[in-house]
Amino acid sequence: MPLQKFHSVDNCAVVHRNTVIPKCCKALVPVRVPRKFIADKILLEPFRNNSTPVLVAGSLSTINNWIAQIRVLNIQPNSIVLKKNSKIASLVFPATINSITKLTNPTRETI
């Protein structure tokens, strides 16, 4: 079951300022969360339809003055600009998650 909960602008993380991401590059992008959410940590999840021109990674982030960081990857052969106030991720609070399992790479012994 996906962690998606909200899609309205009041329940999404939006790009804090115009950000240029070079071609074939990953970056941390500052995003703004709605002021009505009082929390110090938040889980940012990509939208199902991936309406952004970059690949968005789900990430656990700390909120400081309603600003969090999200990791994105530009796989296009040219630079792109993420416009200010464009929706980029949905919000999930860590308290609503039942469990998180650490991803481990299999070793040759376990294969």
Image (cartoon, rainbow, N blue to C red):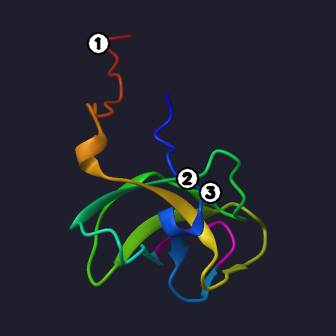
Question: Residue at left 68%, top 53%?
Answer: 50
Q: Indicate which label's residue lies in the foreground, 1 or 2.
A: 2
Corner quadrant of residue 37: bottom left
At which x and y percent is residue 87? Answer: 61, 69
Mark 2, residue position? 46
- The answer to whether 94 is drawn above or below residue 68 in the figure is above
**Residues under numbered marks 1 and 2 in contact, where contact means CB atoms less than 8 Å apart:** no
If you read the primary sequence from the N terminus, does the residue marked by circle 1 or circle 2 appear first? 2
Horizontal side of 76 relative to 13 (left or right) equals right
Secondary structure state at the residue bearing disc 1: loop
Question: Residue at left 50%, top 34%?
Answer: 2
- The answer to whether 72 is drawn above or below residue 100 in the figure is below
The boundaries of the magenta stretch are 22-29
Mark 1, residue position? 109
Identify which amino acid the numbered label 1 is placed on. Glu
Question: Residue at left 67%, top 83%?
Answer: 83
**Residues under numbered marks 3 and 2 in contact, where contact means CB atoms less than 8 Å apart:** yes
Mark 3, residue position? 55
Q: How far apart are labels 1 and 2 at the CA level?
A: 34 Å
**Chief secondary structure of the magenta span?**
strand
In the image, residue 24 lies in the stretch drawn in magenta: yes
Horizontal side of 84 relative to 33 (left or right) equals right
Identify which amino acid the numbered label 3 is placed on. Leu
Q: How far apart are labels 3 and 1 at the CA level?
A: 33 Å
At which x and y percent is residue 52? Answer: 69, 63
